[in-house]
Image (cartoon, helix red, strand yellow):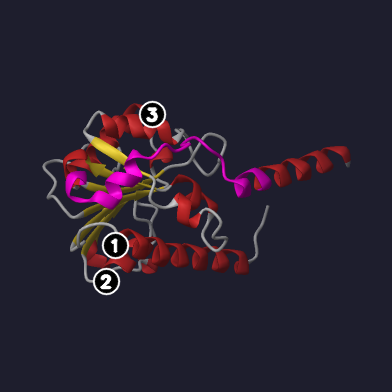
């Protein structure tokens, strides 16, 4: 299937809008973010928003990133293999990894989570759920799987975004469905709002209606194409 240029422009605008809204919401609930690292930053859309709010940032990603399209200064971007352990990383106020973990083999998932918690007490994290689909998705997992990997390292899931943004159609559904904040347990004692959210019962492993509708539409197209053969 070929997409027109306008499709990609709209998709990029959606991501930028999501980064603005969701980062504003995050910063209203966590201690000041003066330093941030993004593992799998792409062109740096989320880091650019954090930098615009005064944070010192650094992004890591693979050789597929076109540096001419970076939204952050070139010197703040570094190529690295995200499947490898970080050696004695410098701690920062916020670690970010969005829709990246599903691209890495299941065998390195614990290492990847270890890298994130090694960077910060606060981790902004999302990963594709089973059946979501995408290019080179080799480890699609439910949020409960990732929660267990963070939990053994002393981090608590905070469902900070879904209740507020679930129906915000201008944000791509994968963020509305998959985005969570993980916080080191000891830090929650001084953050009563986040602690209260973390203590609520929540249905984690759910599929957003927009993902369901997308898959249903694609299935109908395939069925129609088969009938026309």
In this image, 90 relative to 203: left or right?
Answer: left
The tag earlier along the polypeptide, 3 or 2, is 2
Residue labelled with disc 2: 53
Label 1: few (<14), some or many (≥20) within 10 Å?
A: few
Disc 3, SS: helix
Label annotation for residue 42? none
Residue 217 seen in render: yes
The tag earlier along the polypeptide, 1 or 3, is 1
Q: Quadrant of the C terminus?
A: top right
| Residue 143 occupies quadrant | top left
| Residue 29 occupies quadrant | bottom left
Residue labelled with disc 1: 27
Q: Magenta span has 209?
A: yes
Label 3: few (<14), some or many (≥20) within 10 Å?
A: some
Residue 13 location (% of width, % of height)? 50, 68
The tag earlier along the polypeptide, 2 or 1, is 1
Q: Residue 86 or 193: which is nearer the viewer?
A: 193
Residue labelled with disc 3: 106
């Amino acid at each position: 299937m070929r997409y027109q240029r306008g499709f990609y422009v709209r998709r990029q605008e959606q991501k930028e809008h999501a980064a603005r809204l969701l980062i504003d919401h995050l910063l209203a609930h966590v201690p000041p973010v003066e330093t941030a690292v993004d593992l799998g930053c792409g062109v740096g859309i989320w880091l650019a928003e954090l930098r615009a709010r005064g944070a010192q940032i650094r992004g890591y990603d693979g050789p597929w990133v076109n540096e001419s399209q970076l939204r952050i200064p070139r010197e703040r971007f570094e190529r690295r293999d995200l499947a490898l352990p970080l050696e004695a990383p410098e701690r920062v106020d916020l670690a970010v990894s969005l829709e990246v973990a599903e691209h890495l083999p299941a065998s390195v998932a614990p290492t990847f989570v270890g890298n994130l918690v090694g960077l910060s007490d606060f981790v902004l994290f999302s990963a594709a759920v089973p059946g979501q689909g995408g290019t080179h998705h080799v480890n699609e997992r439910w949020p409960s799987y990732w929660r267990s990997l963070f939990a053994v390292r002393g981090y608590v899931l905070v469902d900070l975004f879904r209740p507020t943004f679930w129906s915000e159609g201008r944000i791509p559904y994968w963020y509305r469905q998959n985005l969570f904040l993980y916080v080191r347990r000891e830090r929650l004692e001084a953050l009563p709002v986040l602690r209260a959210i973390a203590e609520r019962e929540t249905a984690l492993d759910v599929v957003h209606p927009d993902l369901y509708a997308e898959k249903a539409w694609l299935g109908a197209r395939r069925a129609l194409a088969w009938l026309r053969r």
